[in-house]
Amino acid sequence: MRLSDEEQRMLDGVYGEMTRKNMKVLVTLGKIFGAERMIKINNVHTPGVSYRVTGDAGLNYVKEASQSVKFKIPATLNTIGIDYENWENVGFPAEFSNKQMELCECYKKMGAITTNTCTPYFVGSVPSFGEHIAWGESSAIVFANSVLGARTNREGGPTALAAAITGRVPEYGLHLDENRKGTHLIRVEKQPETDKDYAVLGYFAGLLVGQDIPVFEGIKSRPSIENLKALGAALASSGAAALFHMIGITPEASRKSDVVRSNVDAVMFGQDEHDRVCEKFYLTGAIDFVVLGCPHTSIIEIRDIAKMIAGKKIKTGLWVCASRQVKSLADTMGYSKMITDAGGEIICDTCPVLCATLTERKYQTVATNSGKMAHYAPGLWNMQPLLLDTSDCIKSAVSGEWRG
Ligand code: F3S
């Protein structure tokens, strides 16, 4: 692997032991994957920052790093384990919350921007088309690669940290043109309309492709950014895909021939395929909890939720998960008050998957418009999931049940 003089100095320890260690991580990774060189980058999104994920081992490592090193480039933080400014009211335990805050402070000391969100692209971190970046968080990775046309591999906490410290990533995988072609063609006959429909399509595709690259053909009306977010998050939950293409819609897929080889067989997505995914996430009866905002909502989604719920009272728990920055705008617009007046909570910085705990609340069923949340709810909190459109989620929150 060829290194520049600067990269070699980092590896030789000229900039200190922590920089040396982290450059070593990237060089080793590059050698494993056959990278010929490093790429200079200027954008990192750091996953693995919930104390629920890092535990004390991760906290101690980051604490040690923060004593001797600063990030070379801008790095945003992914979703953490608590609502940073409201953890006591939400009911997160003090010991966990204190450790989480200590972890965030260590990242901040190194230079991280504490966005605490899985949608950094809604709060100002928007890499350009073709830009090489180092992003973690499966839903954000797939959004960056597919919707923005930026280039990132699936970074974990340690490699994102190493990228932020060195400003480099090894050139392999999705940084290279030849690895960005579609491997599976999905002919979409059942047209998606709502976020739930896009989540269902993404979930179907993830089961089909695993960690490969699906290409969607035949979508007739242009999806919104929120639709694409929903699709990508579900795709990366049922499978481990980091990139999809949608012909005529996503930026690398102007023409089919740009993204799919001629010998790839097509698989059909029709009503039956749609219904099979929905059956997996279906129940009737009492609903205890409703979750919207996985991935964290845009301001448009919060506005829509606020309009749907205004003047009503809910019988279930309701979390609308958002970045603090989007919530701040929602506060200004009066949307937050419309949601909280109805009995809902706008939860910032965290989400049901990464938060400290939900066990105190004893929820057994959850309605959500998110394929990712529906996928993780049973294993994490033993909640039975129901996948619904946003408007039906609100209806089930108001009635406290779902009768179909
Ligand atoms: Fe984001 Fe948590 Fe969902 S990190 S994508 S809200 S699981």
Image (spheres, grey):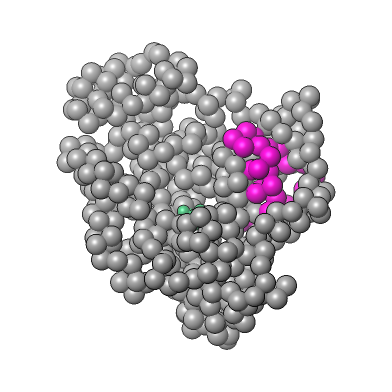
Q: Residue at x 39, y 13 (%)?
A: 2
| Residue nearest the observer in this picture, 363 or 177 | 363
Lateral position of residue 85 relative to residue 182, left or right = left
Q: Which residue is drawn at 52% across and 69% down?
A: 364
| Residue nearest the observer in this picture, 102 or 112 | 102
Magenta stretch: give its range.
Answer: 200-229
Lateral position of residue 10 relative to residue 365, left or right = left
| Residue nearest the observer in this picture, 150 or 49 | 49
Q: Position of residue 143 (x, y in %)?
A: 56, 45
| Residue nearest the observer in this picture, 347 or 397 | 397
Q: Residue at x 29, y 56 (%)?
A: 100
- The answer to if 149 sits in the magenta stretch is no
Q: Where is residue 77 in the image (x, y as percent from the top left)?
A: 37, 49
Q: Where is residue 296 in the image (x, y as percent from the top left)?
A: 50, 59
Lateral position of residue 173 relative to residue 163, left or right = right
- Can residue 54 be seen by looking at this rendering? yes
